[in-house]
Amino acid sequence: MVPSVVESGVSSSSPESGRPTAISVRGLHKRYGSLEAVRGIDFEVAGGEIFGFLGPNGAGKSTTIKILCTLAQPTEGVALVAGYDVVKARELVRRNIGLVFQDTTLDTYLTAEQNLRFHAELYAVPKQLVEPRLRQVLEMVGLWERRTSLVSTYSGGMQRRLEIARGLLHAPKVLFLDEPTVGLDPQTRSSIWEYIMELKEREDITIFLTTHYMDEAENCNRIAIIDHGQIQAIDSPEALKASVGKDRVQIATTDDEAAIGALSAQFELDAGMHDGLVTFSVASGEEFVPRLFADLGVGIRSVSVARPSLDDVFMSYTGRTIRDTEATSGDSMRALRQRFRGR
């Protein structure tokens, strides 16, 4: 079955949408020596879907996207993008995808228009289509009036918008966005997402993005929660939040260790420290709070109750919040640097 798909470039239909499957991954592994960055993942992305990989830095998101974009070879497994095998048909995959990296790859000494014309030549866009397509994508991201300006004069948000325009120029079937708003201020992040959602309305395209921002993941049709190279859950944001089914309660106490012990012994709740607060999940959190004050036996300074969020979903499946995970990862990197300095 796979060889015929590779040769034709036509994939099977997605059972959910009835549209062709844009991405299909089976048993994907990637090892770098003793480090296993991706550990046997499986998923499919339907045509026209906004699909997100949600996870902390180092979870395997960027490694997966590199494999799907033919920038890295899998150690094991099969991946098809736009119906083509990422190992056996690399050039065909590349002609059917657009890619926006975390770090800018624009030539800043050229104008926006020159950057896009160079891209059009690389992808052999027919000459009669270059002018109308160039104007279309630049207008879409609000940069047509600045097309003759050097990219070095652009702000970070403008450069990110130009990279999205460049990734769209050759009319790809799948657009990959690797942490598309990392390092941008909240206002610019919001603006970038407005362009992405407009793009989804105007272009018949599948969008695959990686992110560690919860608010960005909310914009996806479906998300895959990935941690330590493994997919923990896949579903729509609303379905994932509904699967948690409990409210998140966080308390500041006079003795956190005693509070965690009391929650376990008296209320049979699994509590831990997250974001510097004693955190646990319980049904009907607001109704449970009065019992805390009456029976906990430890002084409570403050209480907050929140309906399930994607951060709660991540914690439910991994036992940690993304911020906790990234803090641990940062501590490990600092320790590693110290070891190398010692040598």
Image (cartoon, helix red, strand yellow):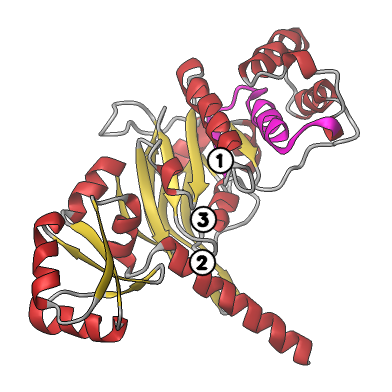
Residue 31 location (% of width, % of height): 56, 70
Name which residue lies at 30% across and 57% down. 312
**Tag 2, which secondary structure?**
helix
Left or right of 205? Residue 71 is right
* Screen quadrant of the C terminus: bottom right
- Residue nearer the viewer, 131 or 219: 219
* Screen quadrant of the N terminus: top left
Mark 1 vs mark 2: which is more N-terminal? 1
Q: Is residue 69 above or below residue 225?
A: above
Q: CA distance from mark 3 to mark 2?
A: 14 Å
Please tell me in which quadrant of the rendered image residue 93 appears.
Answer: top right
Q: CA distance from mark 1 to mark 2?
A: 20 Å
Q: Amino acid at mark 3?
A: Lys
Q: Residue furthest right?
A: 109
Residue 326 is tagged as 2
Q: Is residue 110 above or below residue 276?
A: above
Name which residue lies at 24% across and 48% down. 241
Left or right of 117? Residue 204 is left
| Residue that carries the numbered disc 1 in the rendered image | 186
Q: Residue furthest bottom?
A: 343
Residue 228 is tagged as none
| Residue that carries the numbered disc 3 in the rendered image | 61
| Label 3 crowd (10 A; few <14 / some 14-19 / many >=20) | many
| Label 1 crowd (10 A; few <14 / some 14-19 / many >=20) | few
Mark 3 vs mark 2: which is more N-terminal? 3
State the extent of the magenta-drawn residues as a range: 153-178
Name which residue lies at 75% across and 34% down. 155
Residue 307 forms part of the magenta stretch: no
Q: Amino acid at mark 1?
A: Pro
Q: Is residue 280 above or below residue 22?
A: below
